[in-house]
Image (cartoon, rainbow, N blue to C red):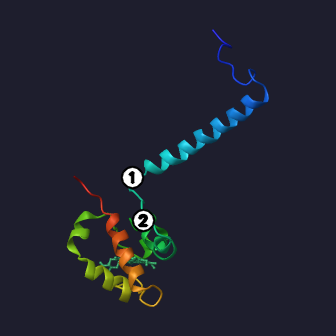
Amino acid sequence: MRASSRIGDVEGGSSVKRNSVLFASASMALLVSSGISRPVRAEGHSETFTTYCAVCHGDDGTGNTEEGKKKGARNFTNAKWQASVDDARLIKSITKGHDKMPAFGKKLSEDEIKALVKEVRSFAVTKS
Ligand code: HEC
């Protein structure tokens, strides 16, 4: 059996148009689903994080980047570590630096740093 499902020769031009729209949404869906299937959610990513932090800590917060591995960047997805530090400590570390972690107190405002702490927290792998 064949040919009963041939597309494109029914309505001439307009069906061609419809097909390309279909194609476009299919590839969009692909893009979206590949985003969702990433092991760690990268939701709520700010431009600040992407600009200043991702080079070492990675888009996924694992620190699994070339720079991050060289310096030993903290893995934000580590639940034990997340539980062992409080927000005040993270604010201080980002503002003044911590070991090989550079200080950002001169580059970023207090509010930006507080927002980053929330973002760091959002990498934690939560189990419910
Ligand atoms: C040059 C690489 C580099 C960049 C850029 C960088 N970090 Fe880090 N970061 C590190 C390293 C290395 C550590 C581990 C140091 C430690 O835990 O003592 C670290 C640790 C941390 C910690 C844990 C500190 C603690 O108190 O345990 C936080 C939070 C953090 N980084 C946030 C950020 C944020 C937010 C940014 C962007 C504003 C950023 N980092 C940019 C390298 C970097």
Q: Which residue is identified by label 1?
A: 39
Residue 99, position as x, y percentages in the image: 34, 85
Q: Choose top left, top right, bottom left or bottom right for residue 87.
A: bottom left
Q: Which residue is identified by label 2?
A: 64
Q: Which residue is drawn at 48% across and 69% down?
A: 66
Q: Is residue 23 left or right of residue 115?
A: right
Dot 2 crowding, Cα within 10 Å, few <14, some 14–19, many 20+: many
Residue contact at pointers 1 and 2, CB within 8 angstroms: no
In this rendering, the answer to whether 18 lies above or below 9 is below
Q: Which amino acid does label 1 sit on?
A: Pro
Q: Which residue is drawn at 32% across and 82% down?
A: 91
Determine the CA span between mark 1 and mark 2: 13 Å
Dot 1 crowding, Cα within 10 Å, few <14, some 14–19, many 20+: few
Q: Residue at x 73, y 35 (%)?
A: 17
In this rendering, the answer to whether 27 lies above or below 69 is above
Residue 43, position as x, y percentages in the image: 42, 60
Residue 31, position as x, y percentages in the image: 54, 47
Q: Which of marks 1 and 2 is nearer the N terminus?
A: 1
Q: Which residue is at the far top?
A: 1
Helix, strand or loop at label 1? It is loop
Q: Choose top left, top right, bottom left or bottom right for residue 13.
A: top right
Residue 64, position as x, y percentages in the image: 42, 65
